[in-house]
Image (cartoon, rainbow, N blue to C red):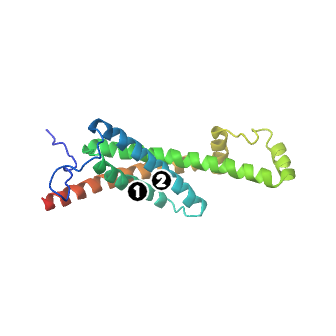
Amino acid sequence: MVAEQTIPELQTSAGGGPPDRAGVPAWLMPALWLFANLALAVAAAWASVQLQREGFNPIGVLSLLVGVVLGLGGVWIARRCEMRRMWVLVTGAVVFGLLAVIGQEYFGYRQYQRELQESFTRDAKRAREILLARSAFSALGDTYDQFVERRAEVNPWWHYALALDAILTAAAAAGATVVGLRTLNRSTQRSL
């Protein structure tokens, strides 16, 4: 039988019991953990798109960085929400890592639409020419599917890059979660 690994009990500086949760019921803590990690994944996805727009996109590095942020941030959130089951936290890190990759794609798509709209409003004559040239597709209201098709036409390796991004982000999130939890366990055991 394998022993269940958990995060050690939180200690307060005043005297040994769990910290005051400001009256938050225990049944609400998993929901807070879920929403806080979702917010972290959305923030990491948005920040990643902003870094990519500024030209910072070394192959794999940004994916690993996002994963590490999600993993260590998830451990910090888990401590605050008193979530202790390692398998839940590692599985959550992988899921939130994949959601961050999906969020990056969504924010990239929205950025594409916003930039296209701005280019149309800046130069009305050029906008009419673009619309006529693209009439075989849809006009400004491109769907996400059409956006993806165009990305794949421009770069046939795009699907592989997306898969690699998802794998690296999820793996880094899971790895950072495990390392963070083990480090936390060791430091807590030393202080006892």
Mark seen at residue 44: 2
Tag 1: amino acid: Val
Q: CA distance from mark 1 to mark 2?
A: 8 Å
Alpha-carbon neighbours of circle 2 within 10 Å: few (<14), some, or many (≥20)?
Answer: many
Tag 2: amino acid: Ala
Is residue 89 or residue 153 the one in the foreground?
A: 89
Work out which residue is located at the far top of the displayed protein and give it.
27
- Cβ atoms under marks 1 and 2 closer than 8 Å: yes
In the rendered image, residue 171, in percent from the top left (x then y), is placed at 38, 51
Mark seen at residue 164: none
Is residue 7 or residue 67 the one in the foreground?
A: 7
Quadrant that contains the C terminus? bottom left
Q: Quadrant of residue 16?
A: bottom left
Residue at 40% of width from left, 52% of height from top?
Answer: 70
In this rendering, position of residue 139 left or right of residue 167: right
Quadrant that contains the N terminus? top left
Q: Quadrant of residue 65?
A: bottom left
